[in-house]
Image (cartoon, rainbow, N blue to C red):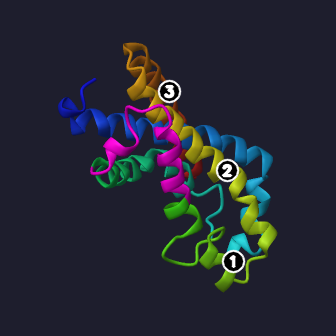
């Protein structure tokens, strides 16, 4: 695909679906491995995380379309540096890890600011890396590969997985509203 013919709508779809799919996969794995139910119900996480029974938590994967739009707008202006080249995924991943995980503008858990300014134990902060580092890596790999090897099958697969994400998110919302 020629860089000059790149449409924002296609970019938005690929960024958003790559993000939502990687977010859902890694969220599910982390939910099981890190026992989010217990973690979110006990300090320090209970001070700022909603219970996993919350409709907002169930809606989380669906609401990632908002982040997909934000990512799309922010990344649109830099797309030439990470799309259409073999190691573009590494540039994109480095950008995301650097700006979204390690160097947030506030003291988010797991960020440098969070480690300095919060009372959250370091081990609890580092546990989050089990989810966010692979998630951002998968996102970067999915998006870059989709542009390097554009095939109709990737659209079909992403549509099917997005339908599954929407289905489970919707069911989660319905179950959580008692």
The residue mark sitting in front, 1 or 2, is 1
Give the side of residue 116 with respect to residue 103, left or right: right
Give the residue pinned by disc 2: 131
Query: What is the magenta range?
Result: 77-97
Give the residue pinned by disc 3: 161
Which quadrant of the view contains residue 149? top left
Mark 2 lies on a secondary structure that is: helix
Total residue callouts: 3
First reached walking from the N terminus: tag 1 or tag 2: 1
Residue drawn at the location 55% of the way across and 36% of the way down: 168
- Say whether residue 171 is visible: no
First reached walking from the N terminus: tag 3 or tag 1: 1
Residue 96 highlighted magenta (yes or no):
yes
Give the residue pinned by disc 1: 115
Q: Is residue 95 above or below residue 159?
A: below
The foreground one among 92 and 151 is 92
Mark 1 lies on a secondary structure that is: helix
């Amino acid at each position: 695909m020629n860089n000059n013919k790149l449409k924002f709508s296609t970019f938005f779809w690929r960024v958003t679906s790559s993000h939502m799919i990687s977010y859902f996969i890694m969220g599910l794995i982390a939910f099981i491995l890190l026992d989010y139910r217990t973690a979110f119900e006990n300090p320090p996480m209970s001070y700022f995380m909603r219970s996993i029974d919350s409709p907002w938590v169930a809606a989380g994967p669906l609401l990632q379309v908002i982040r997909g739009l934000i990512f799309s707008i922010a990344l649109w202006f830099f797309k030439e540096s990470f799309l259409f080249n073999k190691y573009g995924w590494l540039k994109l991943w480095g950008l995301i890890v650097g700006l979204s995980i390690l160097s947030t503008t506030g003291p988010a858990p797991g960020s440098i600011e969070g480690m300095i300014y919060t009372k959250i134990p370091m081990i609890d902060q580092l546990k989050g890396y089990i989810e966010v580092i692979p998630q951002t890596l998968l996102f970067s790999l999915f998006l870059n590969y989709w542009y390097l090897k554009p095939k109709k099958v990737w659209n079909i697969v992403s549509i099917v997985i997005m339908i599954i994400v929407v289905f489970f998110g919707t069911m989660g919302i319905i179950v959580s509203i008692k």
